[in-house]
Structure formats: C-alpha cells, structure tokens
Amino acid sequence: EETPLISCHVPAESCVTQIQALQLAWSLISVRHHSSDPISKAFKKVAQRNQWSAQGVEFFEESHGHGVAGMIDAKAILLGSEAFMKNASLDIPLALKHESQRQQIQGHRVCYMGWQGEVQALFVLREELIEGVDRVIGSFKGRFGVKQCILATGADEILARSSAHWLGADRYRSNLTP
C-alpha cells in the first residue's frame, strides 16, 4: 500500500540522517496510539513497512492541530507545523523553508521536526483530498445556488490557497485548529 509520506529532507549540516529523522518522528507519533490524522497514519505505515519499533518517549505533550513534543534520549524533540516550531523558538534553515514552500505550492502537506534550537528535518506528505469534493462544490454552486464556498483547514497558508484553487472554493481560512 502506498504511503502519503513522499519525502524527508535534512539539511547537510544536520546531526541526523533521513532514516534517523523518520525513526524519531515515528517514536513521537507512536505515543498517540489511536490517532487517525493523516500525518500519524503516514508515519505508522512507514514504520510498519520497515518493522521499526518506537524509542521510549518521556514527557509527551500534544498541541492539537499544531504538533507534538516529547523527550527522547534526553532531547526535547518537537514535530509539527511551522508555527509550532517558531513558537518554540526553533530556527528553520533557509533550505528547508524554501523546500517547504515549493512542496506546498505543489499541493503537499509539510511538517517539521527539531530540537536544540533548530529544525533538523522536513517531512513532505501527499495531501489526500477526498475524491469528488470538487464536483460536490460545483454542484452546490450550480444546483443549489450556493453563492460562496469557503475552505476551512488546518493547513498552512500556501497549501490552503492551493487546495482552495483545486477544489473551486471561493475563499479559504488556513492554520485553523480543532
């Protein structure tokens, strides 16, 4: 089965490899045993395919709609949105920031992982929009006289704009939380 996880990017100066970054992310995600959000499901598929076991996570915290954090091997590791990273005062390397923007313009979802003051990895996931939603929106507008459709999403600004365009929504609201 195909995974929505497309790629993992680590800066050249990062202290981890792509595999290590994926394993750390899986360890954080695995604490959320029954989570059904797309990011958790993507990492679970990768971990199962590679038969990875999760490392122990202490002091796990979740900020709904923004990210998760926990201690692994005495390091406070955060996984989540750009806003989550900035709120924790983690610097995002310019190369990862540019790659993130490029991927979001293409309609992909991104999340960052970092510790010790800097983002160490960028994960890119395929945004899985529900098939046929664009036709439903068109039908509402044509058949039922709906004047305006607004996309409300937790996605970042760039991805929200791209998704709204693809769906035929008139406006969008981004960075929303549950």
Image (cartoon, grey):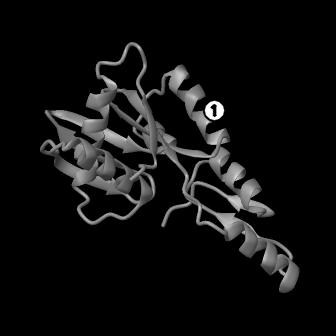
Residue visible at 29% across and 22% down? 16
Give whichever of 93, 19 is nearer the camera.
Answer: 19
Q: Position of residue 143 (x, y in %)?
A: 85, 84
Horizontal relation, residue 168 to residue 38: left or right? right
**Quadrant of the image occupied by residue 169:** bottom right
Residue visible at 12% across and 44% down? 56
In the picture of the structure, the residue carrying the numbered disc 1 is 102
Q: Position of residue 134 (x, y in %)?
A: 72, 66
The correct choice, above or below, for 98 with respect to 67 in the image is above
Q: Position of residue 68 (x, y in %)?
A: 33, 49
**Quadrant of the image occupied by residue 63:** bottom left
Residue visible at 67% across and 69% down? 133
Q: Position of residue 57 (x, y in %)?
A: 16, 46
Give whichever of 31, 65 is nearer the camera.
Answer: 31
Instruction: Give SS at disc 1.
Output: helix
Callout 1, which amino acid? Arg
Q: Residues within 10 Å of mark 1 (few under 14, many from 20)?
A: few
